[in-house]
Image (cartoon, rainbow, N blue to C red):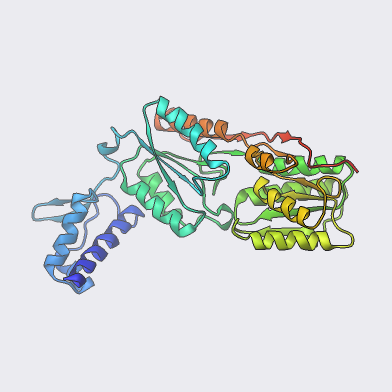
Amino acid sequence: MAEKTIKYIEIFEFYRDKILNGEMKYSEKLPTEQEIGEIFSVSRHTVRQSILELEKQGYIYREKSKGAFVENLDKEKRSNSKMIIVITTYLSEYIFPFLIKGIDEVLSANGYDILLLSTNNDKEKEREQLKKLLEYNVVGAIIEPTASALGNTNIEYYEAIARNNIPYLMINAAYDKKEQSYVAIDDEKGGYTICKYLIDLGHKKIAGLFKEDDVQGIERKNGYLKALEENNIEIDSTIIGKFKTFEEEFYIDGFTRSLLSKEDKPTAIFCYNDKVAMNVVKVAKELGVRIPEDLSVVGYDNDETISAALDCGITTISHPKEELGRKAAEMLLSLINGEKEKVSYVFEPEIAIKNSVKRI
């Protein structure tokens, strides 16, 4: 009995996924029950269970004496939906509660409900959440790309979302800015702005510590490199660190200790964000390095909680957080209402000067 149940689920998921990712299209005929039974080596009874479940969940329809066919997932069932899915890399920490608050503020005021999902910045988890998006009766979606610098490994699901005419908008980054709607910050300009600020204060040996698996990290690093190049400062790869997850605190700590043990150590460090900057400051203090007297530290995102937890406020680039969330929600509504087919908005970076930087 257990084996039969597993086969029934296996067949159901096999054809469900083919329909969701577009391998099987609207009105395409499924193999006969006998053919499916032969493919999976199961009885007609087990096949029939799978077919009934596919029909029950709206993936197929059956015509008497003709067989089973792929259903139109974009039919009128979406027309009365007031549900919008929001998928972010994280939910409960850092800038995300503020971002979600801004999204909810606009969508709730317009009569929409939101379902929050997280990928934990994992590609396989993103795949699972995109499947849910396609399965649920939603009218639109706001999505933060997962590990965006590593490419769109789940492109078939994004294509399926587009084929099903579900409007969606990306936040903080996009896999393909030419094709996708998005709201983000000009991170390259932000990286350039804060690095140029350090240079203008006399710093020439500026280390960098960047997240390498998302577009934001790549663009911030590019801005940092551009500022150094334009000001004829030699780029030293030995003082540029990179990491993929925030769980790599051992790497961040080790990299910081290595930098500060150099005889010709940097006078400043540009950190991917304020969370990384906080770790750098903690390590510096453990080593007796004063901020900013001995070392200047800058971050990104302007997290007030982190600045409040440290003796020194971190000079940083402000993240609009709630404003970005509100803008994303407003622009998604314009897609849902058919006012526009594609939208984009880029926030200009603004530096928040505090007391973690010294003129030299």
Give how far across and how far down residue 14 sits, in percent. Answer: 29, 62
**Residue 205 makes an appearance in the image:** yes
Give how far across and how far down residue 82 sits, in percent. Answer: 33, 33
Q: Residue at x 49, y 57 (%)?
A: 122
Give how far across and how far down residue 152 sits, in percent. Answer: 51, 55
Quadrant of the image containing the N terminus: bottom left
Residue 148 shown left or right of residue 17 in the figure: right
Which image quadrant is residue 265 in?
A: bottom right
Q: Nearer the viewer, residue 161 or 144?
A: 144
Taking 322 as reference, is 94 above or below it?
below
Seen as rendered, the residue at the extreme top is 109
Q: How many marks?
A: 0
Q: Residue at x 63, y 37 (%)?
A: 319
Give how far across and how far down residue 360 sits, in percent. Answer: 91, 44
**Residue 334 makes an appearance in the image:** no
Seen as rendered, the residue at the extreme left is 65
Q: Residue at x 72, y 54 (%)?
A: 209
